[in-house]
Image (cartoon, grey):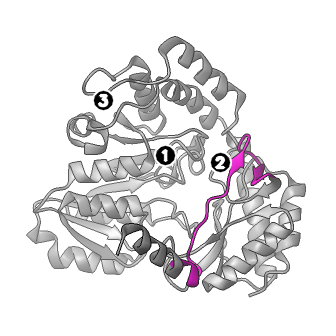
Amino acid sequence: MSLQHDSRQRLADLEARGLLRRPRTVEGQQGATLLVDGRELLCFSSNNYLGFANHAELIAAGTRAMQESGAGAGASRLISGNMAAHEAAEVALAAYVQQPAARLFSTGYAANVGALQALAEPGDVLYSDALNHASLIDGCRLSRARVERYHHTDLDHLRHLLRSNRGSARRAFIVTDALFSMDGDVAPLPALRALADEFDAALYVDEAHSVGVLGPSGRGACAAADVRPDVLVGTLGKAFGLAGAFAASDGDTAQWLYNRARSFVFSTGPQPSLAAQVVAAVPLVESADAERARLVRHSERLRAHLRALGHQVPSLATPIVPLLLGSEARALEAAAGLMNRGIFVPAIRPPTVPVGTARLRIVPTAAHTDAQLDALMSALEGTRP
């Protein structure tokens, strides 16, 4: 059997189960509306939470830096690609999240895979929330440490696991998302910090969807809960409107990542223009209280509307609003219905979410107007439990 034939059969199986994805082409700038396959649609599926993806100051900062420093870094940062712009971005990010140091990565996936692989090793144990992002799961696996999955945000289960086997490992890490990307709920960070301290474990928190969105000045869910993690990972492709990610920690740990995080060591350094945009973005994100307040208002209105329609939607002050529909067919049907009304909210299906929990992941951003949110809520009235 040829590889092509095998791939064709596997694709056919995905399609038969309602799990096949086909790319849609987006043109123009990312905003409240998108030009999708040549059609302008209201977009309620983006992680561009603050609406900064086409911010004029960020575009200008990137343009200036590209003219001054060129298009690319040219090499790994351990060779000749460690540019002044990278170091300036790391200083700005560390100061923003109030950690001593930070390390800039090419993507959020690279940050988690690289950091966890570098920090944990055989003989250690990682306690990972069952609904952690794929990058956390893969980073745990690549570390070759023992991995213990605890039920989602279940502190009793985590305590049971810590009591059962923490003593057999040299080092331990509690690994969690801060704001879970598909359910919109927040990890019990104070209790996780307390367990980490009680059982001599490090707390590793991925703030991908919360940095810029939650907490004072948008510093994240840890700052909102007055919790200091041992490692804080944040991404720049969401609230910052850019690309890339960072891992922030103490200076020694950041230096260890520079030397041993494989996704950092063996990758060309990020574009210096991106690093310059990060420096420009930090004060914009820090001062974006009006945008964060608009996010909360939009989320509260949408959640109340869905509950009035009979849907089970938790009351949370986060921008991710999951509309659980169960089967892949129902989720696809609902997404198609919204598309017919000029609204783009793709169906989320396994393996992104567990089997039986296909959904619409609806995200009103700060870029949306009240009238645009009204249009979404009107279109959703045809989506009943």
Quarter of the rendering containing residue 176: bottom left
Judge the density around disc 2: few (<14), some (14-19), many (≥20) Cα neighbours within 10 Å. many
Image position, residue 372 (x, y; %): 86, 57
Image position, residue 248 (x, y; %): 37, 41
User: Which residue ends up furthest to the front in the rendered image?
Assistant: 1
Left or right of residue 340, residue 52 in this image? left
Left or right of residue 231, residue 336 in this image? right
Amino acid beneath label 1: Thr
Name the residue rendered at 68%, 42% in the picture: 289
269 to 116, vertically: above or below:
above
Secondary structure under the numbered disc 3 in the rendered image: loop
Look at the image and say whether residue 195 sits in the magenta stretch.
no
Q: Quick one: 216 or 57, which is closer to the camera? A: 57
Name the residue carrying label 2.
Answer: 48
**Number of marks drawn:** 3
Left or right of residue 328, residue 153 in this image? left
Cα distance, mark 2 to mark 3?
29 Å
Q: Kindly check if marks 2 and 1 are in contact, taking CB atoms under 8 A apart as contact.
A: no
Judge the density around disc 3: few (<14), some (14-19), many (≥20) Cα neighbours within 10 Å. some
Mark carried by residue 76: 3
Look at the image and say whether residue 30 sits in the magenta stretch.
yes
Secondary structure under the numbered disc 1 in the rendered image: strand
Quarter of the rendering containing residue 146: bottom left
Mark carried by residue 235: 1
Quarter of the rendering containing residue 204: bottom left
Mark carried by residue 269: none
Provide the residue span drawn in magenta.
14-38
Name the residue rendered at 70%, 36% in the picture: 54
Amino acid beneath label 2: Asn
Image position, residue 81 (x, y; %): 33, 23
The N terminus: image quadrant:
bottom left
Q: Nearer the viewer, mark 2 or mark 3?
A: 3
